[in-house]
Each structure stands twice: as C-alpha cells, then as structure tokens.
Image (spheres, rainbow, N blue to C red):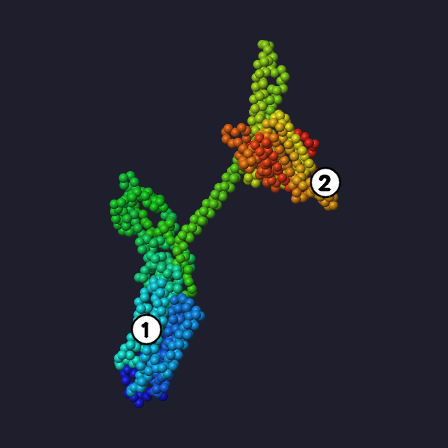
Amino acid sequence: MFLLPGKAPLSSAYLGYLLAFVVATAACLGAAWRARSVVPYPETRQALTWLFSGSAAWAGAYVGFLLVGPALWKHLFYQASLIVGFSVVFAWLWFCSAYSGRGLHRSHAVQKAALVLYLAVTALKVTNPLHGLYYGLEPTGGAFGLVVTHETLYWVVMSVAYALSAAGYLMLLEVFLKAGARTGPLAMLTGLTALPAALNVVGHVEPALLDITHEPLGVAVFAVGLMLAYETRFSVVQLTGSVGEPNLTIGSDGRIRGLGGGIKETVPPLSEEDLGRPLREALPGLAKTIEEGGAVWRAGFDGGKVEECQDSEPASRPQPASGPQHASSIKPKEGSKMVEGTGRAGGDTQPREDAQPVGHLNPEEVSSMEEVSGVEDASYLDTGAHPEEDCRYFQVVEVGARAHGETRTVVLSDITERKRRTEQLKEAKKQAELSKLEAEEASRMKSAMLANMSHEIRTPLTGVIGFAEAIGEETGGNETGGNETGEGDTGGEDAEGEGKVARFAGLIEDSGRRLLDTLDAVLNLSKLEAGKMSLKPGPVDLAGQARQVAREFEEEAAESGLTLEVQTEEAWARADEGGLKIVLQNLLSNAIKYTEEGGVTVRTYREDEQSQENEQVQENEQVQENRQVQEDGQAVVLEVKDSGIGMDPSVAERLFEPFRQASEGMSREYEGTGIGLAVTKRATEEMGGSIEVDTQKEEGSRFTVRFPAARSAGSAGGPDGADRHATGRSETDR
C-alpha cells in the first residue's frame, strides 16, 4: 500500500513536500493543544481548536496522499483533503466572529447557509469521478505516482473560499483598528497565509511545483504565528477591541500592552510609543490607583503631560521628594511685589520681562507667596500639582478577571462632569443645611424677640393703659369741674383744663388698647406659625362662649350706635376654649369696626338638626363613663353677620392673608394692620375647623365658621346665660 523507497527514487521535491506537510500537521496539532491551554475565552478557544485540528487533518490527508502507493488510495486521500480543507474555511469564520465579538457564529440562519454551501461544494467534489470538472489525477513516474490537475470548478471554489477568508480578515482588521493597535503583525500573518494561493497558481503553470493545494502549509504558518503572538498581541487586541469605552490592557509585568476605545484621545499623554512601557512610569497616579483598588483616578493634562491633582491648600501642601518643581523669584518693584523670574527648583531662575504683581496670580497661591516675599530674594516652590478646578476624574473599572494571570483590561470612564455635578449637589445640600440652621436660629431669635416683646412692651403698655384709665376716672369724677381759692373763682379755667386732661387720657387709653390689641395679634400669629400656640381641641359649649364674648362687646357696639343680637341654639364643638375665644373676639371686633349703621348678629347652630335628634336617642342607649364627650362626625356653625360696608367678593379670600385689607395704603379709611383675620383662619384650622366669607360691597358680610360637633353625656361646664347683647375686643381688619 505505501510507497517504498526501493521501488522508485525519492526526489528532493517529494521529500520536501512530505516533510512540509508532516511539519504542518505537527504544527497544527501543537497549536490546537496550545489554544486549549492558553485562550481564556470559550468561543474563541473552541473556534481555534477546530481551526487548527481541521488544518492538521487537512495537512495529514496530504501526508497520506504522498505516502500511499495505489492510485485508489491516493484518490481517496486527495478527496478527503478537499472535503476537510473546505470545512476549515468555516472554522476560520467561526474564529473571526468570536474573536471580534460578533454573534454570526451563533446565528441559526448563518449556520444553515454555511451548511448548505458546504454540502453543495462537497457534493461537487465527491461526484468528480462522474463529471471531472473539479480535478483530475494522472499517473506519472517517480515517487509521486499520481499528479493532480485542477479544473474549472476547483478555481471557482477556491475563489469562494478566499473571499470568505477575506471577510474574516476584515473582521480582525476592524478589531485591531478599534483597539488602536498596530496592524503590522496581522498584515504579516495575512500575507503568509495567502502565499499558498500563489503557490497553487505557480504549481498549475510550472512543473517545478506540484499542482496540489498548498493551503495547509499557509494555515500551519498562521497557526504557529498566531500562537506565538497571541499572548502579546492578539489577546491584548481582543481585550481592548471588545470594550467600547476607553481602555488599556496591562500585562502581568505591569507594562502597557494595548490601548483601545479611543483612550489616546481621552488621556492625551498616551500614544503608541507607550506600548511596552511600565504603567508606573507612563501614568504613576493611575498605577497607584489600580494597585490600591481605587475607583477614581484624578489627573490634569497640560501640554501633553500628566499632572497629578492634589488638594489646593497651599499652606499645608506637602512638598514631594521628586517630580517637577518650579521656583519663582519675588522682589519688590515699583512699590509692588513682582514675580521677577522663574526656573527649576535648585537652579537659576530666568528673568521675566512680563513681571506680574503677586496679586495677579492664582489667588490660592498668593498667601504662600506673600509669606516668603518679605525676603529680598525669596523663592516660592510650586510642586507642579494641577489646580483642582482643572482636574479630570476617571472611573477605573477592571473588566473581567486577569486572563490566566497574564493580562487585564482597565476601562477609564471620564466622569468629570458627573463628579462636578455631584460636588455641586453636595455643596447645595451643605448650603441648604446651613440655610436650615440659619432659619432655625432666626426662628429661635424671633421667638426670643417675641417673648421679649411680650415682657418689655406689653407690660409697660398695660401700665400706660391703667394710668390713663385712672387719670380719666379722677378728672371725670370731679363734679365741680375745678378748685376754688381765696384769690377768686377760677372754676371755669380749671374745668376746661380738666376736660382736656380727661379727653387726652381717653385718647391715650384708646391708643394703648389699640396698640395692645395689635401686639396680641402679632404674638398670636407668630405663635400659630411657629406651632408654639397649644390648641387642644375638646368639647366646648359654642353657644355659651358666643354669649359670653358678646357681652364683652356690648358697650362698644352701643357706643357705635349698633345693635348686637345673639341667636344661639345649644351646640357643642370640638375646639380649644382659648382658640375659640380668639376667633369670636376677632370676628365681632371686625364686624363692629366696619359697620357704621345697623347691627351685628351672632348665631350658633347645628347644620343637621335630624342628626341631633338621632344623637339623643343613641345617647340614652349608651352607658357613658366619666361624663365623656365624643365627636359625632357632624358640624356646628358659628356665624357672625353685619350690615357694614362689605367688600368686593374678588378680594375676599385675600383677607385671610397676613397684613391684607380690603383697602390698603396710607389713604385707607379704616385703621388696623390686617392680622386679625389671618389669626382667625389659622386658629380655626389648627382646631380642625374651616372659615369662609360671603360678602357684597355696601351690603355687609357674613363669616361662617364650622367646627366638628361634639356631644355631652350630662351637664357640662361652660359659660351660660340667656341671649344677650355683649361685646369684646380684638384687633381685626378688613
């Protein structure tokens, strides 16, 4: 079966071909084994293993073709080489797709198309004995026994195979370009792989070479070259090219092995010249950040150089033992300290024609420079640290573990803007906290001031009012109107003088009371706003409170020529007794003040009378403990109606805002500060009630206050009395 040397002379060409294909077989088998051991990525590893194993089988088929003697066996080995060889093309495309990060090899449509093409070409090769359009085998003397002649279909299929292979090379080229890597090694391997095509053509036209397929030899060269270069170039390119963001690949020795994702534009100092350079020398700050497991690297770039960022605190900045240091000579000149020269620290400084006053330099450095400028010829050292505001921040992320302890890829994401926004948010939060503290302090100061007002103003003001009352009573109580003396009767003059005193005392008393009412309103409003007024809703006899407060205002209404009518139905409200009194006083004072003729009516009633009857039935059926009063969910109403001046409904709602009146400005007709109704609204809402106003200009106003209703199981304490006319006093404005 095998060709024995004794039967035919072994030519040097025969031995050369045999040795070449044996070496190619061994090289491809070794490359397949190496790929399984070295390549860390499963899909790339599997593709390379199939590529090199198929190439080994391809070359091994040619070894069998050369060794066997019978023509039939030669024919079978040659057909096997053709069938296996075409499958290597698809293993190559599988590798290129996996290496470049594409998913073509996973696509079922692509897989089906590849299978159909492969089976069609294989059918042409297997049926060649019938049509003879692919190849021919002719007997020849010598060691080869048979020679191969390639026909038309062979060249067509070879063109298709090389076209598919070229598509794979384009995938690899894209990865190299994307990674910013040198394409020289890829071009060299491509040229060596394509060399067999030239040998095929030469073998077809020249008798010096056999007219057989030389591609297994090219694939063997590619396999050896790829495995030799994989760890230093191809693996690095695959790492850097598969990451879209700026990245660099670092070898196990700490040297830069690859630059990808546009990192040369992101970090300007980096270039192709840095490949193979230790990262600690090229970017010491980044190397330190990676070693310490840091997440953010800060750096500034100036003139193609990296300047590490430091905190901009000139007085406490440490002086580095090494690194760029610059000296500035400072001398007094024309009455101003000037920068006279610059140079390397420890060397001579060079004069500067554009000498600048110290105050024109970086403000952060001025203080340090001025400290040393008292010396006649002082030097200021600059560490070369980049100003904080010019720093750029990079997020450092290591993508994937180190491949078998050999290489690692570090992605640098420029997060400068995000970092600055974060710092701005932190600063804003800090300012907000400071503002909050300032507001709390201001509130505390306001509370202290109000407490002081209550003591320092209210107390003497009460004294003024009391003395005014006393003076008025004393002067008004003298019926003679004066004093008689032995000199004569001066009663007329004394009466006139005492009348003025009484009138002035009355004015003092009225003004004092008005001022006291204003002060009380301001204090009440401030306490309500600050939550300092303790209003605890409980059962309150609304009707009784209305009658009591009305009695306080009886005299004031009579003096104004007004009637004050109280219409009450038994009604209990859930409210604070003190707060309810404030509401009643403000509303009655407001109504009397703005009514020139007619009268004021105060009403209390329950909104749902039927619910009151049902309540009595339920009350008799329940056992009440401790005379407890409970809320029944209905509402009781306090209504204060007047026949006064009224107002435009469009401005009515503004009355409940502090310091608002229907008429405002110095020319307003009625006095007041516009606080009373604001206090009324806030106090009502604090007690769970509501207030509304119904008014028309020149037709009067009606204020309606609603409180949650309450019920009593027995007699309840509280003011009582028949419907009476009464008055009270509180400062309120409309």
Where residue 389 is drawn, which disc sits there? none
- Which residue corresponds to the image point at 42% horizontal and 57% vertical from the top-left? 295
- Which residue corresponds to the image point at 67% horizontal and 33% vertical from the top-left? 567
Q: Is residue 616 above or below residue 13?
A: above
* Residue nearest the viewer, comparing 574 with 250: 574
Question: Disc 2 designates what residue?
Answer: 714
Q: Position of residue 561 (x, y in %)?
A: 62, 25
Q: Position of residue 615 (x, y in %)?
A: 71, 43
* Residue nearest the viewer, comparing 349 with 474: 474
Q: Quadrant of the N terminus?
A: bottom left
* Residue nearest the viewer, comparing 238 with 315: 238
Label 2 vs 1, first from the N-terminus: 1
Amino acid type at image mark 1: Thr
Q: Position of residue 151 (x, y in %)?
A: 32, 79
The residues bearing labels 2 and 1 have C-alpha atoms spaced at a distance of 110 Å
Amino acid type at image mark 2: Gly
Residue 118: quarter of image:
bottom left
The kind of secondary structure element at disc 2 is: loop
Q: Is residue 125 above or below residue 385?
A: below
Closer mark to the observer between disc 2 and disc 1: 1
Residue 170 seen in this snapshot: yes
Where residue 193 is drawn, which disc sits there? 1
